[in-house]
Amino acid sequence: MEIRKVTGDKRAYLSLLLLADEQEDMIDRYLDRGDMYVLTDGDSAVGECVVTDEGDGMLEIQSLAVDTEHQGKGYGRRLIGFVEETYRGKFSVLQVGTGDSPLTVPFYEKCGFAVHHVEKDFILEHYDHPIFEGGKQLIDKVYLRKALERFCPYERRNNAMIFGIVGLGLIGGSLARSIKFHSEHTVLGCDLNETALLQARMVNAIDGELTAETLPQCDAVLIALYPQAAVDWALAHEGAFKPGALVVDCCGVKRFVCDRLFPAFEHAPFTFMGGHPMAGRERSGFSYAQDDLFENASMILCPMPGTDVETVRQAKEMFLSIGFGRVRFTTPLEHDEMIAFTSQLAHVVSGAYVKAPLAVKHKGFSAGSFRDMTRVARLNEEMWTELFLENGDLLLEQTQGLIDRLTEYRDALRDHDAARLRDILRQGREIKEALED
């Protein structure tokens, strides 16, 4: 797909123009004075956009249409994103006027526009026939606007990027600190906790606050929230992500997030990947964030099916450059299967083990084994409850498997079966040794 400016006969694309505006004399009002762009698939034009200079720093989208065979694939958003990037810095406001349609007004709102004013009875007074869309007769013209000015004062240094980090707890805060430690990138952050935001600024983990005005400048956005909150935030800000940006969630479960965001962002002008930084501590909050938390750690990425190879390569290089030891690509299902075993089951075991009545008497009787077994019992129960339940089917399977294996030990002890006990202990040792080879 390619977007190009029309320098010849604009009326050659009249069939597309009429999809956006059913009456030719209304098209005549803006076509000659406007800049026209077409989205082409090979030799065929599948979408068009016409913009005009309305004075006082305002650029208006007069026409936006995608042919019926290509609708629902994100091409309209791609055209809007192209216009924003082309004219940002030249105009301060992007405006669009559309009929009071139950289809087009929500579309523009999803693209980051907000209703500015309504011109009553415009459709009735200016069109010679009734116009219906989405089962509704259009009557008024709704004008929506969004800012085009480069409000963000954080200019790129050399080839440095601008990162946005949503959530400045342990993971988000450590991401911010790691990026600043390993690179010259600019980092913008946001958090509902004002103390976390202040702490991040005081230690120079962030250069400024991530806001509605600065989000559209971010080359990469890392969402470090609980799964449901991450999904909600990403969907709410879909229209504000910069075209070409990389958006990655950092949640500990991937099916829950990706099953919701892959379909929503399939045709978006930015790239979404599921992500999971494989590092952590027993305590939460920005106060415990570290710039070396991800040293020798893996960043797991789940690209959306169809993501091009070059984008995947760039994502890998980006995470390696900001402090990760390796990047592993997988699917949401494989991720959740493995995490149910390597992480979530370990937290179940640790929590169950430390609840033994003798735990309160451990001092003087315990060494490394007790410390290792109980380390991850110190957890954030709000977050882990959500993670456990959102991966409940796979965690239940792993928990039942552990119970079955523990039963073998119980039965051997109950029956005083030395041969059986020796055998299952040997099996465990051999498996551990094989894992370390």
Image (cartoon, rainbow, N blue to C red):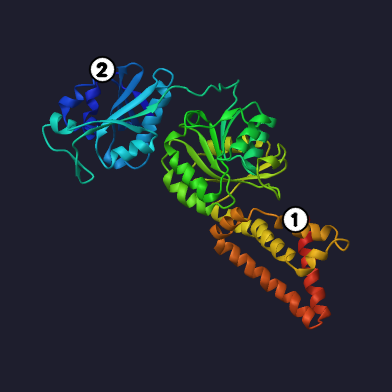
Residue at (21, 28) in percent of width and height: 14
Label 1 neighbourhood size at 10 Å, few (<14), some (14-19), many (20+)? Answer: some
Q: Nearer the viewer, residue 113 or 250?
A: 113
Q: Which residue is mark 2?
A: 33
Q: Quadrant of the N terminus?
A: top left
Among the 4 quarters of the image, the one containing residue 220? top right
Q: Position of residue 390 (x, y in %)?
A: 54, 58
**Element marked by disc 2:** loop
Label 2 neighbourhood size at 10 Å, few (<14), some (14-19), many (20+)? Answer: few
Q: Position of residue 41 (x, y in %)?
A: 35, 34
Structural distance between the alpha carbons of marks 2 and 1: 69 Å
Q: Position of residue 411 (x, y in %)?
A: 74, 79
Residue 1 visible in the snapshot: no
Among the 4 quarters of the image, the one containing residue 165? top right
Among the 4 quarters of the image, the one containing residue 32? top left
Q: Nearer the viewer, residue 76 or 11?
A: 76
Q: Which residue is mark 1?
A: 375
| Residue kind at label 2, given as amino acid type | Arg
Tell whether 149 sits left or right of 391. left
Residue at (35, 33) in percent of width and height: 114
